[in-house]
């Protein structure tokens, strides 16, 4: 195993631990790290989505075992997100234009989450209509397929700011959303561009993020207080936004 791959595996493990604690796959940070290596943008997006799928598959299982899903509220978010994520994965966009919009929107979302950090309780939760959930899911699904991430980094701040559910329930919902949209986005990319990556890189990196994601999800379920999950989420989104804007 070459040194570059070892460094990538160690970096991806750490990313998966941190992002997994918020219900994220880490796709945005995988893309940032992979961009430092001699890989094409198509390869980078595919590897990031494969790692996303690996991390959140394990997280979804753990969240499900601990009863953190509410199917009646989650299904409307997912139904439109899957086809829209697939279409986004098939669409080619100019990188710089997208990252400008992405960086600004994430910076605003994370700032609002940091400014309004209180924990959600049963008494102050908002019940969005099925149509509102479907519109949110479809829009975020398209964006996630477009750039090659699972969409959790868009969905999570929206759910927090709208008081959609309890914080750990939002982390679980975000993980499931990332899983289905990463699969749909990857399918769209493969159909459009074919399979263009060497298999040994994804296997090593997927193993690293699986282990890291398991550590992160267990921290959320058994160790971290809900308010800290929300703070970690906000800080992660802010860091990604700043990195994107500085790299343009």
Image: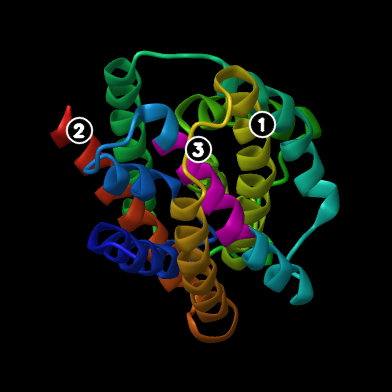
> In percent of the image, x 51 and y 86: which residue is there?
223
> In percent of the image, x 50 and y 37: which residue is there?
46
Q: Nearer the viewer, residue 26 or 70?
A: 26
Label 3 belongs to which residue? Answer: 46
Q: Nearer the viewer, residue 198 or 75?
A: 198
* Residue 46, placed above or below residue 115: above
User: Is residue 52 highlighted in magenta?
Assistant: yes
- Find residue 187 and name its label: 1
Q: What whole-number distance in Å separates the C-alpha atoms at marks 2 and 1?
A: 29 Å
Label 2 belongs to which residue? Answer: 245
> How many discs appear?
3
Q: Secondary structure at mark 1?
A: helix
Residue 18 rendering spot, x and y as whole percentages: 39, 67
Quarter-wise, where is residue 172 in the image? bottom right
Q: What whole-number distance in Å separates the C-alpha atoms at marks 3 and 2?
A: 23 Å
- Residues rendered magenta in the picture: 44-56
Residue 66 rendering spot, x and y as whole percentages: 74, 77
Q: Which quarter of the rendered picture does the C terminus lie within?
A: top left
Q: Nearer the viewer, residue 65 or 160?
A: 65
* Residue depth check, mark 3 versus mark 2: number of the one nearer the observer: 3
Give the mark, 3 or 2, whose residue is nearer the N terminus.
3
Q: Secondary structure at mark 2?
A: helix
Secondary structure mostly taken by the magenta-highlighted segment of the chain = helix
Give the mark, 2 or 1, whose residue is nearer the N terminus.
1
């Amino acid at each position: 195993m070459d040194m570059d791959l070892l460094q990538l595996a160690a970096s991806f493990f750490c990313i998966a631990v941190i992002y997994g604690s918020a219900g994220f796959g880490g796709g945005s940070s995988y893309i940032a790290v992979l961009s430092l290596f001699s890989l094409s943008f198509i390869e980078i997006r595919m590897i990031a989505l494969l790692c996303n799928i690996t991390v959140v598959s394990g997280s979804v299982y753990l969240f499900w075992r601990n009863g953190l899903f509410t199917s009646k509220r989650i299904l409307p978010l997912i139904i439109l997100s899957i086809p829209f994520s697939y279409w986004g994965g098939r669409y080619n966009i100019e990188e710089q234009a997208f990252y400008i919009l992405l960086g600004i929107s994430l910076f605003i979302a994370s700032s609002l989450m940091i400014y309004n950090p209180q924990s959600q309780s049963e008494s102050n939760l908002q019940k969005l209509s099925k149509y509102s959930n479907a519109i949110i899911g479809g829009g975020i699904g398209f964006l996630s397929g477009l750039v090659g991430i699972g969409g959790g980094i868009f969905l999570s701040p929206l759910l927090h700011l709208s008081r959609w559910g309890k914080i750990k329930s939002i982390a679980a919902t975000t993980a499931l959303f990332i899983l289905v949209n990463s699969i749909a986005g990857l399918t769209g990319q493969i159909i459009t561009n074919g399979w263009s990556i060497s298999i040994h890189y994804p296997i090593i990196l997927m193993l690293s993020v699986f282990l890291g994601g398991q550590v992160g999800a267990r921290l959320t379920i058994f160790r971290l207080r809900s308010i800290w999950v929300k703070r970690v989420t906000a800080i992660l989104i802010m860091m990604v936004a700043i990195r994107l804007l500085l790299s343009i």
